[in-house]
Amino acid sequence: MKLLITGATGKVGSNFLPAFLSAERFAGWSVRALCHNRMLEMDNVESVRGSLSDREDVAAAMSEVTHVLHLAAVKESPDLAMDVGVKGMFNLLEAFRSSKSANQFILMGGDCSVGHIFHDYRDPITESAPRRAYPGCYAVTKVIEEVMLEQYQFQYGINGCCLRAPWIMEKDDFRHVLSFKAQFGGPSWKDLLPQAEISRHIADGAIPLLRGQDGAPLRRNFVHVSDLVSAILAALDNPAAKGQLFNISMDRPVDYAEIAAHLKATRQLPVTDIATPYFSNWLSNAKAGLLLDWHPLVDTKHLIEKAWSYVRADNDPRTVWYPG
């Protein structure tokens, strides 16, 4: 068996590969990483340079491959979004369907395809909920990827699987999310507060208690990278994953009121209420539990404690992974 992975040097890829290589179930598999900006330097992994937008590069990388894990993505980069999210996906799928060895294609999707906090869903968001991208090129490319994989399954009968994840946390990411410093995944504090107020909250070490359009504490979906990795491993080479779309998230969304209460009680941090134009949503992971027997281990309190206990070394700077 040979696994081709894209986005291997990103947040998910760099956590997935050590877990995969140490898993007894995948002993004897070989791994090839198709890299573009950052080359992978890792024992037991063949690293090749190429572009997803180049059909010949993709075809060469697919040689003798049995399984594909497509993690590569770009975020709000219009000049790259179509190359990676549309043309890259198309090239991978074309090479996959034409291959005599290809067996399974796994796509890493995102809850941006259902608009997460930008759109109001009255019911839990299941895999059958309508796709509703939020504004921006990233979300629309993730919708296109999901649909393209779905249609290739109809057209050519390929064995595909999409794992749809919300905002992915590792290390002290969640602590940064709960600060008033610049956010990569939102919200943009300058769109909600005057700069003087933002500066004061940073100085005070305050925690935001976000409220949705209805005035109630906002609930937003997250997943810890360790749980996402375990879901990928559960889906990989699993017949139960064939043709399926799975929401991969915490059992219940993070409630900003629970965060505020926990951090105020355990660390005496000041809390500030912030009105937002967003909607609370609940990404249901029940299907992954039923078909893959996958269950996340990290809940809200664990997410907080992992972030606050992590000590970032001088040689471990915060990384914005995109573009991959």
Image (cartoon, grey):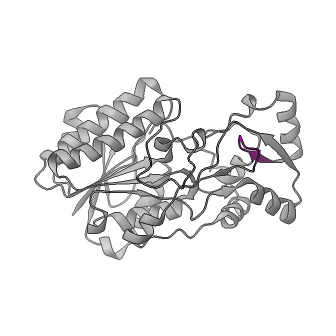
Residue 92: x, y in percent?
25, 42
Residue 76 visible? The answer is yes
Q: Is residue 37 above or below residue 288?
A: above
Q: Residue at x 42, y 65 (%)?
A: 288
Residue 74: x, y in percent?
45, 36
Residue 297: x, y in percent?
56, 70
Residue 35 visible? The answer is no
Magenta span includes 209? yes
Of residues 33 and 71, the one nearer the viewer is: 71
Q: Residue at x 75, y 45 (%)?
A: 211
Quarter of the N terminus within the rendering: bottom left
Of residues 115 and 228, the one nearer the viewer is: 115
Q: Residue furthest bottom?
A: 24
Q: How many marks?
A: 0
Query: Position of 310 compared to 16: left or right?
Result: right
Of residues 245 and 303, the one nearer the viewer is: 245
Of residues 217 and 7, the one nearer the viewer is: 217
Q: Residue furthest left?
A: 100
Quarter of the C terminus within the rendering: top left
Q: Is residue 175 above or below residue 203?
A: below
Give the quadrant of residue 258.
bottom right
Magenta span includes 143? no
Q: Residue at x 46, y 42 (%)?
A: 113
Residue 261: x, y in percent?
82, 60
Q: Residue at x 47, y 59 (%)?
A: 248
Q: Is residue 80 above or below residue 19?
A: above
- Magenta residues? 208-216
Query: Position of 47 compared to 60: left or right?
Result: right
Give the quadrant of residue 28.
bottom left
Q: Is residue 310 above or below residue 62?
A: below
Give the quadrant of residue 31.
bottom left
Q: Residue furthest front?
A: 122
